[in-house]
């Protein structure tokens, strides 16, 4: 069962979704939970069904002290690389929190200081701490919504099911129809790179 990182500090957990995708933005979330918050279902978003993620999103958004989402789009990813774009999206989310955190816990191994707030990077933190898991849920569900919206204009890539990840159907769509304005041109879009309509 996941736990709180600290009972004494106001902790914001941060995570992102979409780093490994070929299209769309990277979306990050920051979440501050009440110190008495508990939920037996809450876990790393990758381990949960869509139904459970959608349920948890409602609970988190209702019960969190503060939560926020930050986005870095595919053009920014191409300009500054996916790692820097992920950190940028996290900074944007933290900046939008309505309550200031005393301390940040970040899922992963890389982060740049945000103002004067101390932080700690935690490998697989979304499977250890409630606030990071909550952030993973918020980031994932908000990003999925974006990709479902993009799918309405670009249905050939099946983003409503693969969310922009490099599935066979997504790559088949790229081979047949070329790329869209939402594809990340700095990524290897095909397993054996061929000429693309860029």
Image: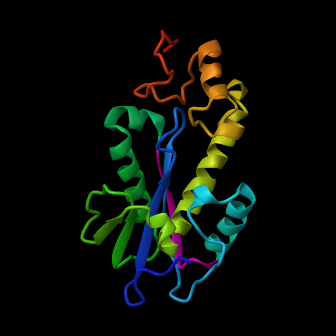
Looking at the image, is 161 positioned above or below residue 6? above
Q: Position of residue 190 (x, y in %)?
A: 51, 21
Q: Is residue 52 left or right of residue 175?
A: right
Looking at the image, is 160 positioned above or below residue 88? above
Q: Residue furthest front?
A: 1
Q: Which residues are magenta?
A: 63-72
Between 168 and 27, the one lying in front of the other is 168
> At x 44% / y 62%, what residue is drawn?
124
Between 2 and 54, the one lying in front of the other is 2
Q: How many marks can you see?
A: 0
Between 119 and 91, the one lying in front of the other is 119
The answer to whether one can see residue 62 in this image is yes
> At x 63% / y 55%, what residue is drawn?
141
Quadrant of residue 119 in the image?
A: bottom left
Q: How is the image coloured?
A: rainbow
Q: Position of residue 136 (x, y in %)?
A: 53, 61
Q: Position of residue 175 (x, y in %)?
A: 60, 15
Q: Position of residue 111 (x, y in %)?
A: 30, 57
Q: Is residue 13 left or right of residue 54?
A: left
Looking at the image, is 46 positioned above or below residue 125? above
Quadrant containing the N terminus in the rendered view: bottom right
> At x 31% / y 55%, what residue is drawn?
110
Question: Dominant secondary structure of the magenta stretch?
Answer: strand
Q: Residue furthest top?
A: 195
Between 93 and 184, the one lying in front of the other is 184
125 inside magenta stretch: no
Q: Is residue 60 left or right of residue 89?
A: right
The answer to whether one can see residue 31 in this image is no
68 inside magenta stretch: yes
């Amino acid at each position: 069962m996941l736990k709180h990182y600290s009972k004494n500090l106001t902790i914001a957990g941060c995570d992102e979704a979409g780093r490994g995708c070929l299209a769309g933005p990277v979306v990050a979330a920051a979440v501050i939970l009440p110190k008495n918050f508990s939920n037996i279902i809450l876990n790393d978003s990758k381990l949960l069904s869509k139904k459970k993620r959608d349920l948890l999103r409602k609970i988190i958004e209702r019960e969190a002290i503060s939560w926020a989402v930050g986005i870095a789009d595919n053009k920014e990813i191409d300009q500054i690389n996916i790692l820097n774009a992920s950190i940028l999206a996290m900074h944007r989310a933290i900046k939008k929190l309505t309550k200031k955190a005393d301390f940040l816990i970040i899922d992963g191994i890389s982060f740049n200081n945000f103002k004067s707030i101390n932080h700690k990077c935690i490998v697989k933190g979304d499977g250890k701490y409630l606030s990071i898991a909550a952030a993973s849920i918020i980031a994932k569900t908000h990003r999925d919504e974006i990709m479902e919206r993009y799918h309405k204009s670009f249905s050939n890539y099946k983003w409503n099911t693969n969310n922009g990840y490099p599935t066979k159907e997504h790559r088949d769509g790229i081979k047949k129809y070329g790329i869209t304005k939402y594809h990340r041109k700095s990524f290897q879009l095909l397993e054996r790179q061929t000429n693309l309509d860029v």
